[in-house]
Every structure is written in C-alpha cells, then in structure tokens.
Image (tube, helix red, strand yellow):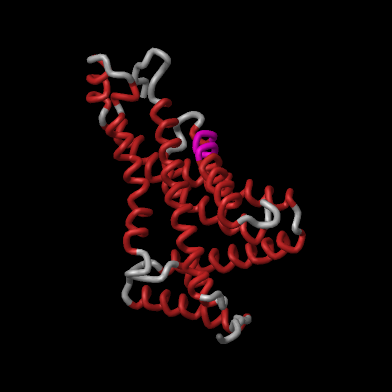
Amino acid sequence: MQELIKLDLVDLAFAVGLMGVAIGLSAWERIGLELNLALATGRTFLQLAILGYVLEFIFTLDNLWAVLAILGVMLTISAIVARNRITPKIPQMLPLVWGSIFVSTTLTLVYTNILIIQPDRWFEPQYVIPLAGIVLGNAMNAAALAGERLVSVINASQLEIETHLSLGATPQQAIAQYRKDAVRAGLIPTVNQMMLIAMVSLPGITSGQLLSGTPAREAVSYQILIMFMIAFANLLTTLLVTRGIYRQFFNSSAQLVR
C-alpha cells in the first residue's frame, strides 16, 4: 500500500483554487453566492487550521483536564447552535438542550469505550475527541430538527391541544403525536443515511481513513461503529429534548401557557 501523501501549503493553495473557480462560476452565472462562498472558504480554512494546531497541542499534552476542556467547549457550542435553531425565546432552553446532548453523548461514549474500543485510558485523546465530535455534531442537528418541529407544531395547534386537555387528556397525551412526529423528523436524516450508506457514496469518515492509509476493512468497521453511535445518540437526544420542550408549554395545572 502506498504511503500517506502529505499535503503542503502549495497543495492547500491549489485546493483553495477550487473555491476560486466556484466563486468565478457564481459571478459568471450571476448566482449571487460570491460573498457567501468567499466567507465560507475563509472560515473553513481558518477554523480547521486552528483546530489542527489545538488538537495537536492536546494530543501532545495528553492531559485529562485538557481533554475535558475541549469537550466542554464543543458541547457548549453545539448546544448554543441547536438552541438558536429551535428558538432562543423559551426560558431554560439552553440548559435543556445542553443537558440532553450531554447525557446522550456521555452514555454513547461510555458504552463505546467500555465495551468496544477499550482504550488503555478512557480519556485517550486519539479516540474520545474525534468520536465525541462526530456524536456532538449529529446530536446537535437532530436536536435542532426535532425541537424546531415540535415548537412550531405546538404553536400552530393550540386549539387542538386545548381541546384534548378539556376532554381530560394529560399534557403528555395531548401532544403525544406531535412529539412522535418531531422525533421522527430528527431521525430521518440518520435513518436515510444508514439505509443508503456505501451504496450511493463513501462516508466522509471512511474516505478520510482510506486516504490516510487505514486498511479498508478497518475503516469500514469504524464506520459501522460510528453510524450506530450516531443513531443511538440522536434518538436519545431527540427524546430528551422533545420531552423537555413540551413541558415548557404547560404549567403545574396542566394548562397550555404559550
């Protein structure tokens, strides 16, 4: 197998050239995406460059508190992004989303570390940071999709919900179908990806490992593990987020208050 071909600054400059061509095509066709593409290109390059140096420093430092610190930052950013996509107006939304993603990610990583990967130390940066990043990113999107769907439906269906309540239904019963639909909405991208994975395109994780020289079977094995981690974490996250959200819409007397 050929050794890993490393990319230097000249190679990365040519890679940026791809985006230059894309910006030129947008201008030529008058699409109007030139500024967005330029900003996205700059942010991608800057953010990933900084991430590379930060991760290299943490891997070299090999310290528990450094690992926990970067995981805490990643968790907080993902919770803020998910909260903003749902709504920033509901009180306690950020702690709710933060706690939901934290619980699902922690349980997923604990299960994976103890029963599957079994590293020498549970906080081994090589494993816990990449896996946590993958799970956090996907849990963030699932929480945003499910939460936004539930908030929108509850706001649009107040009459139906109050009718159920007047007939003796509990808040949980009154919004049960709406919550199920919201959870399904949050899981649709994950399920679709699992249904078509390796049939339409190679997943990014597998492609990256193959480019780095990892044997194909090993790369595929890790991709299987990652997909199952994502599915579990996303389902748990959406269940926790939707449960917490619907409770924000009812008072102690089981009345709809929003």
255 over 145 or under it: above or below: above
Q: Please report the residue visible at 64 percent of the width from the left and 66 percent of the height from the top.
A: 52
Quadrant position of the N terminus in the picture: bottom right
Q: Does residue 253 appear to the left or right of 56 in the view shown?
A: left
Going 29% across and 39% down the picture, which residue do you hit? Answer: 181
Q: How many marks?
A: 0
Q: Is residue 97 magenta?
A: yes
Residue 104 vs 255, above or below: the answer is: below
Position of residue 202 measured from the top left corner of the image (x, y, whole percent): 41, 71
> Magenta stretch: residue 218 in it?
no
Q: Residue furthest front?
A: 115
Q: Measured from the top left, where is residue 98 in percent x and y?
A: 54, 39
Q: Nearer the viewer, residue 157 or 38?
A: 157
Segment colored magenta: 95-100
Q: 77 or 133, which lies in front? A: 133
**Is most of the magenta stretch helix, strand or loop?**
helix
* Whole-percent x, y for residue 16 in the image: 52, 77
Q: Quadrant of the C terminus?
A: top left
Q: In the visual, does 2 lie left or right of 58?
A: left
Q: Residue at x 59, y 83 (%)?
A: 5
In the picture provided, is 39 more to the left or to the right than 173?
Answer: right
Q: Quadrant of residue 57?
A: bottom right
Q: Residue furthest bottom?
A: 2
Q: Where is residue 256 drawn, in percent x and y?
A: 34, 20
Q: Is residue 208 above or below residue 157?
A: below
Along the line of sight, the residue nearer the viewer: 52 or 118: 118
